[in-house]
Every structure is written in C-alpha cells, then in structure tokens.
Amino acid sequence: MRHRLILRNITQTFEDGGMHRTVLDHLNLQVAEGELVAVMGPSGSGKSTFLSIAGALLEPTGGDVLLDGESIIGKEKQELADMRLHKLGFIFQSANLIPYLKVEEQLLLIAKLGGMDNSRASGRARGLLHKLGLSQRLSAYPEKLSGGERQRVAIGRALMMDPAVLLADEPTASLDASRGMDVVQMLACEAREMGKCVVMVTHDERVLTLCDRVLYLKNGRLTENG
Amino acid sequence: MYLAIREMRFAKVRYSLIAAIMLLVAFLVLFVSGLAKGLAYDNAASIQNRQATHFIMEKDSNARFTRSLVGEQVSERASTIVGEENVQPLGVKMTTVTAEGTAAKLDVTVLAVRPEGWLMPAVTEGAVIDSQSEGQAIVDDKLKDSGVGLGTVIVDQASGLKWEVAGFVSDESFSHSPAVFISGRDWQQLQASAAVRPGGVEEAEAGSNSTNYNAIAVKGDTDQARQLAAALPDAEVVTKTAAVSAIPGYKEEQGSLLMMIVFLFVISAVVLMVFFYVITIQKSSQLGILKAIGTRTVYLAKSVTLQVLFLSAGSLMISVLLVQAVEALLPSGMPFRLPASTLALTCGSFIVMSLIGSLLSVWKVIRVDPLDAIGRSAL
Ligand SMILES: Nc1ncnc2c1ncn2[C@@H]1O[C@H](COP(=O)(O)OP(=O)(O)OP(=O)(O)O)[C@@H](O)[C@H]1O
Ligand SMILES: [Mg+2]
C-alpha cells in the first residue's frame, strides 16, 4: 500500500508574547491511497495548524512532510505554490470560489495555472462537473449557486489537477445535514476510485460513518480514540 | 490575463466608472499639453525656428532681445571666432502697424534679418526679398486674417515707415504677435527714425554712423560659445533655450501650464492608486485562497498591473481620439499644437504614472498570506 501523505515528527511552536506554545508535538500521520481520514478535536487544539502544515502553507518548526514522497521542507515560495497546485487539493470551510468566475471557469483557471492544454482542460472540467451533478450550471456565477452546489464546485476545483492529497477544513460546516453527507460521500468516493488520500478536519459527528479512520488531535498528537 | 479580464467583465460598472475618470483626466492632460505647446509656439516660434545655437546680446540685457543693443564690431569679432558664414545680425522690435486703407491696428514684431542669410525663413507664398530691396516685407500668414494680402502696404505707427507685403511665411511669431521680416536697409531707417524722435541730434548721429542690431545670432558649439564670451567681455552669449524663455511671458505661461500638467499626472496616479488599493484590500481573502490553491504571487501581481495598464491605455486611446476631434474643431487662431512627439511623451508619462499608482496594490498582493485561507471563516 502506497502512502501518498506522510507527516513525520511534526512539531509546531508559536511564540506568544515571549512564551513558547507547542501546538503540535511530534505528530505522526501516514495516509494511504484511497483512504479518507477524519480529524477531530476541540477548538484550539491545532487542527487548522496541522492542515496548514500538511498543505504546504506553513513550514513546521520541526519534522518533515512528504507528498508523494517529496519533502516540502526548505522549498522556495514559488516551488511550494507549484506543489500546492499539482499535488494538493484544498476544500475550505465555506467554498471560497472566485466570485467573478463562472462554474466552469473556476476549474479552467486551475488548468491554466497548471499549464494544461485547453481542449484537455475543458474536457476534464466538464467531466468532473458532470460527475458532481453540475452539468446544468456550467456558466453560473457562484453568487447564484446554493451552498451545496458551491461546495461541489470547490471539490471539482480541488480535483482538477488530479492531486495526490485532498485537504478539507470543515467542508460541511456551512451545509445542512443531508447536503453535508452528500459532500463527504463524494470525497470518500473520489478517494477510493482515484486512489487519492483525503484528510478532513470536521466537527460533524454524522459524517464519521463514511470515513475509513477517525483521529483525534490531543496534546499536539493524533490518536485513534477520543 | 485570465483573471484580470474576467474580473473586469464581472464588475463592468465599477471598472467603467474608473475608466471614465481616467478618460477625463487623460483628456485634460492632453488638452493642456497641447495648449502649452501651442502657446509656446505662438510665443517663441520666430526664435525657436531659427537655426542659431546662441545669441550674442548686450551685457545686462538678461537675455532679452528688446533690451539689448549690439553694434557691427561685435558681429565682426564673432566672425573671427566662428566664421563669417555662421554669424547673422538680428533686429527685433515690437511695434504697431496698420494696413494702408484700413483703420485696424495690428501688433507685430519686426524682425530684421539678412534676406539671403540663414535667419530668413522660407517664403510659402509670394516673392522673396533681397538685401537691395527697400520698403518690402515678408509677413506671417496670420496677418491674412486681418485683411493683409500680397501687395498690401503696412505702415509703422511710430515711424511712419511703409512696407509692401512681398510674401508670406507661416508659423512665425514673437511674443504672441505675428512676425514681419524686413531687410537690413529698412531696419537702418527704422532705427534712425526711432532715434531721432525722442533723443534729438546726438542720438540721431550715433544711429546713422553704424547700424545697431538687438542680437547677433551665431551657429557654433559650446566651446566656441565659451571663446565668444571670453572675447566679448561687454556682451553676453545666450543659448537659444535661454533666449526663448526670456521672451516676455514665456516662462510664466509655460510654468503655470506645466504645473497643471504635473498635477494632473499626480491626480491620475493617485486616483488609480486609491481605486485599486481599495479593490485589492476588499479581495485580500480571495487572493489568499488563490495563493493557497497554488497561484503564484507573480501571476496575481501581473494581473493587477495588467488591469491598471488596460484601464489607462484604454482611456488614453479614447482621449487621444477625443483631443484630435477637438483640435479639428478649434478655431484656427487658437494656439493649440499636439505634435506626435508631445503626444507620445504625454501618453508615455501617463502610463508610467498609472503604473506607479499600481505599485501599492502590487505590494498588497505580495503581502497577502495564503495561510489566511485556512481556519478562517471568511465571507
Ligand atoms: N500564527 C499564530 N501565532 C500564534 N498562535 C497561533 C497562530 N496560529 C495559531 N495559533 C494558536 O495555535 C492554536 C491552534 O490553533 P488552530 O487554528 O490550529 O486551532 P483549531 O483546532 O483549528 O481550532 P478551531 O476548531 O477553533 O478552528 C490556537 O491556540 C491558536 O491561538
Ligand atoms: Mg480551525
């Protein structure tokens, strides 16, 4: 079994008014392809910090992050941006689509940034949006979409470059129960079918049944039971 | 490119409004530039157009033609340094004339030159004059508007001297009055008559034994100018630029117009800066998202710069067309000139100023942290 995301001995300390606060303390995590992992924990336990490090947005104080075997440590900002573009897909709490791009363009932008050629890009975007049930809304602006539709577009956007890892920060927070289930269902499905690994931070107990593993962030470490 | 265009397409109203403001400012910049250039030309064309590099004037004349008097001997001394062919005497006298048969008084500037020399402009209509001709003048074609034609006799009010219009030149004026070119012979008479009137016998005699001019025009390099200054301690050697800006009113006119132009440039930069800065701040969380999903900062910075460029270039293009339309509609007497060089310079400066105005936004774009995208419940 291949591990597409590996976090090794991650330590993160923040300096706060002269005091060192260790938020993550020798955290270890390996996520295999096809796996959907849920991360839970009380507010302030460091879930977002953990996700930022896994997502190459924040360089940890100590430890190593491997994406498809490639380390993110000591890389230039531009290289990190390129890694995020090609190897990672982000799904944020609220969809955070670009307001002036139509649904299809949200995906095409990513293809453009990734240097995918136009015909392939538009084929892939349409395919993804069809699978997500958005074929009817290709040229709608985000303001015209429902919360669930927006989150599905965000999933499509995250999948556009066929990344190794999907990271989701409370993707169901702004959705009602059944729509939340739909979205997580899609993530689980994507992980299994495409051999991706998905890490999802969530407060939503209802969706846990769809996850392969549920981890709890406690005292700066991830444990199997809460 | 992809983002820049789509964002403007989405917020059409917002960007059109700012484009409209830019258009008005750009139009004003171009119009005032044209006016400044036109006034400069109207004021100084007859000095500007001369091929001279320097003018030798009397000491303490402050580079003003009308205050200076120089005699033959200066001209001779100058000839020994720069060569006879590079020296020409120039007489300048602002006066009032009437066209014979009409009552209207016309302010003109009489310029005395050697008709065969290089100070004489090319005649566009009528005949040339030579140094033997007497009582003949070549005048600026703006005088046509006042009913002066070929063969019209114009009478100098002060001296009563009469000159017949032999030909026309175009775009020749001094201190906003049309130029009248006469030969050295007529100048001598004009000088003599002027000296007789108020001063009496002594001055009349002084005037008759040698002709005084206002300046000696020379063609030479800076080195020769230095030699001239050394050889002529009682004279001052003035560059053409200095002589032009010493024309009464020239500096003041150009100074205030230049100030307006500079202010308009600054206004355009500030307007763009504020507009784009506010927009960039508004969308900083969105920029964080874009960076988080892998957009390079350079791409986003380019995107903002491109929008600024697009707006300023677009509004500039329309205002150039507008200004050219207005130029065509302006009455011919209006001093307005927008040669390609001025147009290019103004447009270039406008673009540069707007790019300067975009710097603040670019700086803001660079500073947005992609980390903000995670863990914030933005919007
Ligand atoms: N840049 C920073 N500087 C200082 N302290 C920080 C910084 N970022 C996060 N922290 C602290 O680290 C701790 C973990 O924050 P984090 O945002 O990861 O929590 P969380 O688990 O995501 O909480 P929530 O469930 O409320 O989103 C918090 O106590 C926070 O104050
Ligand atoms: Mg959080």
Image (spheres, coloured by chain):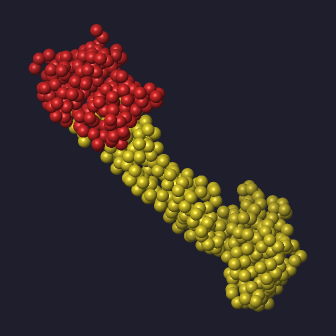
Chain colours: A red, B yellow
Q: Is residue B244 above or below residue B344?
A: below
- Residue depicted at 14% across the width and 28% down the height: A204
Q: Is residue B360 above or below residue B21?
A: above
Q: Quadrant of residue A30?
A: top left
Q: Is residue B353 above or below residue A10?
A: below
Q: State which quarter of the image contains the C terminus of chain B.
A: top left
Farthest left residue in view: A226
Count of numbered tags: 0
- Residue depicted at 26% across the width and 35% down the height: A149
Q: Quadrant of residue B76?
A: bottom right
Image check: A206 left or right of B244? left
| Residue A8 appearing in the image | no
- Residue depicted at 22% across the width and 24% down the height: A185
Locate residue B24, reporting x and y percent. 47, 61
Locate residue A158, reporting x and y percent. 32, 28
Out of B306 and B38, give the one closest to the viewer.
B306
Image check: A188 left or right of B366? left
Image check: B82 left or right of B64? right
Farthest top residue in view: A1
Locate residue B157, reporting x and y percent. 73, 87
Out of B41 and A98, give the one closest to the viewer.
A98
Farthest front residue in view: A136
Q: Is residue A12 above or below residue B185?
A: above
- Residue depicted at 29% across the width and 42% down the height: A144
Locate residue A108, reporting x and y percent. 40, 32
